[in-house]
Image (cartoon, coloured by chain):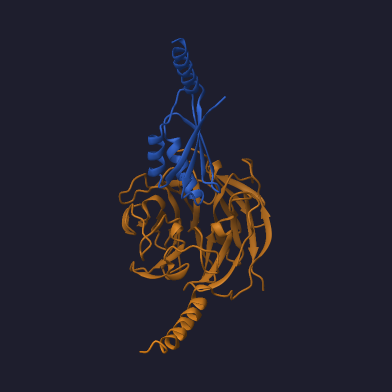
Amino acid sequence: MKHPFLIIAAALLWSTMAAAQGVRYELRVDGLACPFCAYGIEKKFKKTKGVEAVDIDLERGLVVVSAGEGVQLTREQVERIVKDAGFTLRSMTEKTLP
Amino acid sequence: MTRRMKPLVIFPLVLCFSLLASCAWFPEAKEPPYALVKSWGEKGSGPGQFDEPTGIAVAGEEVFVSDARNGRILVFDFDGNYRRQIGQPGEGPGQLGRPMNLEISADRLYVADYWNDRILIYDLSGAFQRGIGERGAGPGQFKEPGGVAVAGNGDLFVADFNNHRVQQLSSGGEFIRQWGVTGETGFLAGKFNYPTDVALDAEGNLYVADGYNDRIQVFGPDGALLRKWGGPFALNLNGSFNGWFATVTSIDIGPGGNVFVADFYNDRVQKFTLQGRFLTAFGVKPAGPVHTAMAVAVADDGHVFVADFDRNRVEKWAPVR
């Protein structure tokens, strides 16, 4: 019975650390065609609380969003931001920053 | 009609259609391409450096360039010698977020500030005069304006990018009329799909760079659509053939009465008559991962200046005689 408690405790610790360390989100977005689009989506994310940096790779349709310590963006939240900017979210991955 | 006769009728029809299509949709160049005579700039934030040049205009012997990520306008002479900076990054009066396409009229510089949802006006020395507009979808408001043109009477025509419309405002910013339906994209005549820039010819006709519809639409002074071009029927079919576009980001009308269009994804500027007849194209392929021909401006002496987004530089092109 000890193991499940250990696993839950470790998971809680990990998620707390992840939130404290900040997260980088890599978003694949359909429809990014030029700097006009890139600036539009960047503007939306930069007005989102906790977002510290946004980098956009037009050629690959990739938007990289870095959130600060203790900030977590949900997929629904990201989808809404991308949609409000006029685009479609294809996929989303997140990495905890070291 | 018998089955044997059908091919006899269909074949000439197909042949005629193909010939017409090849003339209209795949035109030959009528002029030689321009020659690249000079370029200047590199990535950075110092004097004369750029971090994503997105707009360009010329007046007298000077070139004005939107330096988007640095939130400023840089001014050079025609040989690329740096002269001064206009504006600084920020959201306050006279400060710039992401300056995009530029216009110069009656010794005033008009800047479409995409980030701050307004048009800023400076004198050519750089002194801030005033701002027009605010964020919104109502009359006289903007959502990420991309470009502006100014009529002889001072009226402003603004490509209201994310509202999918073009607005005409008085010199004081009062709404007069608009083209397109606010917030609605469309590819049929008169509708827009992220308009990026506008220009006026000497007759007062309005030329709209209909960005993601990959076409130019032209409206008369009475507001009626006169013509459109860009691919078959100008119905949002993109391509790299002569006269086709792949994301139109800037437009200017030269002193000779020709239309110059920045065709961003095709890394080229295309030159047309006012009626939309293709004349020639020129540009350079990117060195990096993005594209080159972002914005275009034509000087009175016929030189064409291009904001090269990929290489963070300005290019000066000359007609080949």
The residue positioned 50% from the left and 52% from the top of the image is: A33
Q: Which of these two is toward me, A38 or B180? A: A38
- Which quadrant does the N terminus of chain B fall into? bottom left
The residue positioned 45% from the left and 23% from the top of the image is: A70
Left or right placement of residue B88 versus residue B198 in this view: right
Above or below, comparing residue A9 to residue B54 in the picture: above
Is residue B97 visible in the rendered image? The answer is: no
Q: Which of these two is toward me, B223 or B29? A: B29
Task: Give the drawing colour for chain B.
Answer: orange
Task: Give the drawing colour for chain A.
Answer: blue
Give percent across and percent down for residue B60.
58, 60
Is residue A20 visible in the rendered image? The answer is: yes
Q: Quadrant of residue B264?
A: bottom right
Residue positioned most to the right? B37
Above or below, comparing residue B165 to residue B256 in the picture: above
Q: Which of these two is toward me, A61 or B44? A: A61
Q: Quadrant of residue B185?
A: bottom left
- Which quadrant does the C terminus of chain B fall into? bottom right
Give percent across and percent down for residue A82.
42, 42
Give percent across and percent down for residue B10.
43, 84
